[in-house]
Amino acid sequence: MDNIDLSPLAPPDDWQPDSNAALRRFRARETSPHRRLLLTAALAVVLCASVVALRPTHVFAQSEPSDFFHLQRFWYWFRILHSPAILSRLPDVRIENVPGPAATFAPKLPHSSALPGTAHFSAPGAATWTLANAPITLQLGAAISAEWKDVPDLWSTVVLTQGPEPVLSVPPGFDALSVAAPGFRNRNRVHDFARSPFQAAALLFGDGSRSRLLEIHQLNVGAIPALLIEDTNEDSHAERMTLLWTSAGRAFSLHGDLYVPVQQRTLGEATAVADLVGLAETIR
C-alpha cells in the first residue's frame, strides 16, 4: 500500500491550542440571529407536523385546554396567518322556497360533552337559490337544524344544519366562478378554493349573508376538505364563523356567533377556529 502524505493537514509550526478562543467562537455561533431564525423555523415545522400527525381528542374551551389543544390552536393561527384568504362581497341571490315534505332522516349531532344544554330543532324546507346576474341555481333539499343558545365561553349561539348535498346547476361551458371572481380580492386564486362542487357553491352563495365582508379559508374537518367563512366587521374583527363540509352524501353547516368579536390574525381567532373545527369532529 502506498504511503499517504498527510503533511498538508498539519497545523502551522507556531500553532498552540486555545480552548478559550474556541469557546468564544462556539458562543458566537450559538447566539447568531441566523441560527436562531433557523431553529425557530425548525421548531414551527415540528409543532405543525405533530398536530397533523397526532390528531388529539378535542378539548373544548369550556374545559381546561390540553397541551394538544394549544398545539392545534397554534396550527390554525399559522394556517390563517400564512395562507391566502379571499375577501368578498357575494353576488345578489334570489331565494324561492320549494313545497315538499320535511326531512325525515336522523340528524348527526356533536358529542353531548361538547355542547351542554338542550338543542332546539327545526326543519327548513327545500329551497332554490338563484344568482340575480347569472343563470346559476343551487337546489337545497329539506334539512334539519339544531340550535344551542348561550354556549359557555366563546359562542352565544351555535347552529348545526344538515341535509342532502345541494345540487349546483350551471349551463354547459359556463365558468360559474367567473361570476364571483370580481368580488374577490384574490380573484386569480378563486378556482384554487373550489375543491368540490359544494365548495364552488359556497364561494358563489356563501352562508346566506350579504351585508358583510366575508373572509374564506381552506381547512379540514378530520381528513375532509372544508371551507371556513368568517363574517367580519369594519374593524377587522370576526363576529361569526361558519364551517361547511360534506360527508357520506350529507352536507353540513356549523355556524357560531361569538360572544365577543375576535381580532383577525391573532391567537384569539385561532382559538375560535380550533374550537369550531374540534366541535365538528365530534359529530356522529
Image (cartoon, rainbow, N blue to C red):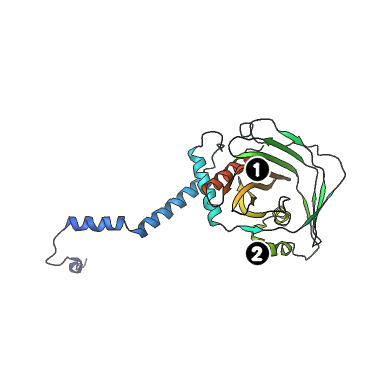
Residue 86 position, x and y percent, is 63, 58
Residue type indicated by callout 1: Asp
Front-lying residue, 107 or 2: 107
Residue identified by numbered label 2: 187
Q: Nearer the viewer, residue 56 or 130?
A: 130
Q: Residues within 10 Å of mark 1 (few under 14, many from 20)?
A: many
Using the image as rendered, state which of residue 274 and residue 210 is in the foreground. Answer: 210
Q: Amino acid at mark 2?
A: Arg
Front disc: 2 or 1:
1
Percent from the top left, x then y, of residue 136? 79, 59
Q: Is residue 219 visible?
A: yes
Which residue in the structure is indicated by mark 1?
257
| Quarter of the rendering occupied by the N terminus | bottom left
Cα gap from disc 2 to disc 1, whole angstroms: 28 Å
User: In the displayed image of the protein, which residue is found farthest to the right?
Assistant: 99
The answer to which quarter of the image holds residue 55 is top right
Identified at 50% across, 37% down, the residue is 66
